[in-house]
Image (cartoon, helix red, strand yellow):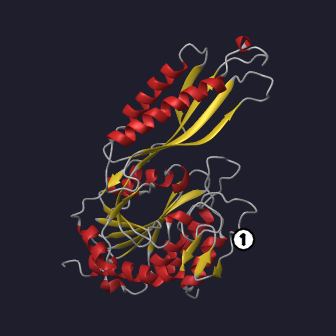
Amino acid sequence: MAKLSLRQMIDRLVATPSVSALDPKLDMPNRPIIDLLAEWLEHEGFAVELLELPGNKANLIATRGRGPGGLVLSGHTDTVPFDEGKWSGDPFRVREKDGALYGLGVCDMKSFLALAIEAARAFDDADLKEPLIVLATADEECGMDGARALVEAGKPRARRAIIGEPTGLTPVRMHKGCAMERLELTGRSGHSSDRRYGASALDAMVDAIGAMRELRSELARDHVNEGFEPPTPTMSFGRIEGGDSPNRICARCTLDYDMRLLPGMDLDALRGEIHRRVARAIDGSGVSAAHSALTTFAPAFETPATAEIVRAVEGLTGHAAIGVSFGTEAPYLTALGMDTVVLGPGDISVAHQPDEHLPLAHVDPAIATLRGVIERFCVRTEA
């Protein structure tokens, strides 16, 4: 098999659909993309291990070199669903326009896996005093199932890791935790001509949201970390559904919401406070409340500013490490004992939307940075 060019790898990865979603009708296997990566990495001299997951999904752990320590270059293989008809071209075909590559996952974050392979090509096995590991995971976008499976398996083992999420090549050493929650209110239907005939879950939801917005303001007042933008925890109401007809009192109303917590905040304590405030807000309405988690909590993450990997990537990129609000698999690699930095090409602002793209100007600097990190931690380990 002839080696593919960087652009050919990116094209093949984007052309291989791997949507993950909570809706089973949209969810897809990632195994076809894992099989592609396994073939390429074996051809590059990596020893490849697959960690199977339900639903024809898998994680891939590819290793070159032996010994303790080592460096992980990690990316997730899945994408979010796409908006049918909103793209200016086929989401699964990479297009080059105005100095950027366009395609689903080209920024978030399939291209990083191709960049990691391209960066590794600069080194021979004899160069590596500590192992270089390329890690590709499943289901990052809807529950971190792949990363959780890695923690359960206790692998891979390394001293340091870079996760190539789009950060504009600015290193990220901390991010907020993410919880996606549901509030379901149940009342009693009845004829809309007289509210006494029923108990409106929709009216009660208005009061519940008011109480939650008040708590949101208090959280922003009481919890501030200037290392983040925005520097406070957030609560976002993303989806609401209720009722079936204007002439019937609404018997059921559901709210799905997202919370981003600063490092050190206690999710269970916050959940308890939300439950108490909602209960007070709907007291006497004849409506009951049920709370549930839509996904498993993705924890906050923080690597010390003094960690060697942080200092190294700051020197290579010329940028001080920052904090961000979006979540990654970093907490799970940290749980495996790795000092972790999030660092990749592209901008998170174009992810999860039509015409996602990756600036071509980021490609060469990304490869150079990755090669610098490999040189520092796998080749020149005594530095």
Residue appearing at x 62%, y 51% in the figure: 21
Front residue (pair 196, 128): 196
Residue highlighted by disc 1: 88
The N terminus appears in which quarter of the rendering? bottom right
The image shows residue 143, relative to residue 128, as above or below, that is above
**Image location of residue 252, percent across then percent down:** 67, 26
Query: Which element carries disc 1, helix, strand or loop?
Result: loop
**Image location of residue 130, percent across then percent down:** 28, 75
The image shows residue 73, relative to residue 205, as above or below, that is below
Residue appearing at x 53%, y 16% in the figure: 283
- Quick check: 358 left or right of 167? right
Front residue (pair 334, 105): 105
**Image location of residue 171, percent across then percent down:** 36, 68
**Image location of residue 223, percent across then percent down:** 33, 43
The image shows residue 270, relative to residue 165, as above or below, that is above
Q: Quadrant of residue 31?
A: bottom right
Mark 1: amino acid: Ser
Q: Is residue 68 visible?
A: no
Residue appearing at x 70%, y 22% in the figure: 251
Q: How many marks can you see? A: 1
